[in-house]
């Protein structure tokens, strides 16, 4: 049974997340009721792993959704500074000190800007180099966000596929129980074989 599940899981998406096994025929995964418990447990473990990946991907996507506008805003400002000609009049503006506090500043034409790199590190860059760096960071962040959204859709599909597989396995076991009961002359089904579906 485990070999069959591994073979079905060989394919992955672009980020290496494996496809869930699609159960068209339950007999491809179990040959008797004795294998149902192990197969059901494998399906539930895979669902838990996909749900764990889904939560982590949601967190990463939420961080990127905050990061992309910040990078874009910084890039817009650097592009504006880059467009100013030497000898232009100083620009009077306000800049943000924190979420609710702003200060006034006068900015003369400049060929250098300072960028926060994280971990309390700030570096000076020529304006043209800063623009190139920010464009690269913006493109990377946007691509990462797109990948996260694709992965979230993919993970939801795999979870649904496994939930359907679990339901089919459960229904197959019920059918086999009824068949065995009929073959044995209608005796009581063993209580230790009764189960409930996940979330059921």
Image (cartoon, rainbow, N blue to C red):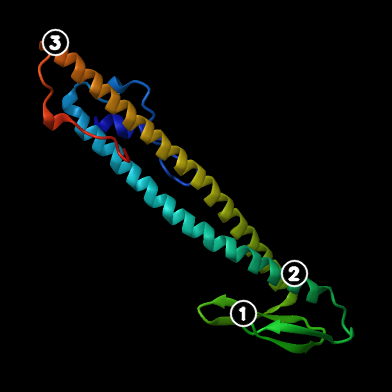
The reply to whether dot 1 and dot 3 touch (C-beta < 8 Å) is no
| Quadrant (top left/top right/bottom left/bottom right) for the C terminus | top left
Q: How far apart are the two marked residues, 1 and 3, measured between alpha carbons?
A: 74 Å
Front residue of 158 and 122 = 158
Front residue of 34 and 79 = 34
Q: Residue 28: percent from the left, percent from the top?
A: 30, 22
Secondary structure under badge 3? helix
Residue that numbered label 2 is attached to: 76
At x 42%, y 54%, the residue is: 55
Residue that numbered label 1 is attached to: 99
The reply to whether dot 3 and dot 2 touch (C-beta < 8 Å) is no
Disc 2 residue crowd, few under 14, some 14–19, many 20+, Cα 10 Å: some
Work out whether mark 1 precedes mark 2 in sequence or the reverse, and give the earlier one: 2
Work out whether mark 1 precedes mark 3 in sequence or the reverse, and give the earlier one: 1
Q: Residue 169: percent from the left, percent from the top?
A: 29, 27
Secondary structure under badge 2? helix
Name the quadrant containing residue 135.
bottom right
Disc 1 residue crowd, few under 14, some 14–19, many 20+, Cα 10 Å: few
Residue that numbered label 3 is attached to: 183
Q: How far apart are the two marked residues, 1 and 2, measured between alpha carbons?
A: 20 Å
Front residue of 141 and 64 = 64
């Amino acid at each position: 049974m485990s070999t069959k599940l591994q073979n079905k899981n060989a394919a992955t998406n672009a980020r290496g997340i494996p496809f869930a096994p699609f159960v068209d025929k339950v007999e491809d995964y179990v040959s008797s009721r004795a294998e149902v418990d192990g197969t059901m447990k494998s399906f539930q473990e895979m669902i838990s792993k996909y749900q764990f990946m889904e939560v982590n991907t949601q967190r990463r996507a939420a961080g990127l959704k905050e990061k992309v506008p910040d990078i874009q805003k910084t890039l817009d400002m650097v592009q504006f500074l880059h467009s100013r000609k030497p000898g232009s009049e100083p620009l009077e503006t306000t800049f943000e000190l924190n979420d609710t506090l702003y200060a006034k500043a006068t900015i003369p034409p400049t060929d250098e800007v300072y960028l926060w790199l994280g971990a309390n590190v700030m570096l000076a860059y020529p304006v043209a180099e800063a623009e190139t760096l920010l464009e690269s960071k913006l493109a990377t962040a946007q691509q990462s966000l797109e990948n996260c959204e694709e992965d979230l859709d993919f993970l939801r599909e795999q979870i649904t596929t496994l939930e359907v597989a679990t339901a089919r396995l459960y229904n197959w076991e019920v059918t086999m129980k009824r068949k065995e009961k009929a073959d044995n002359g209608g005796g009581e089904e063993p209580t230790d074989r009764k189960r409930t579906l996940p979330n059921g």
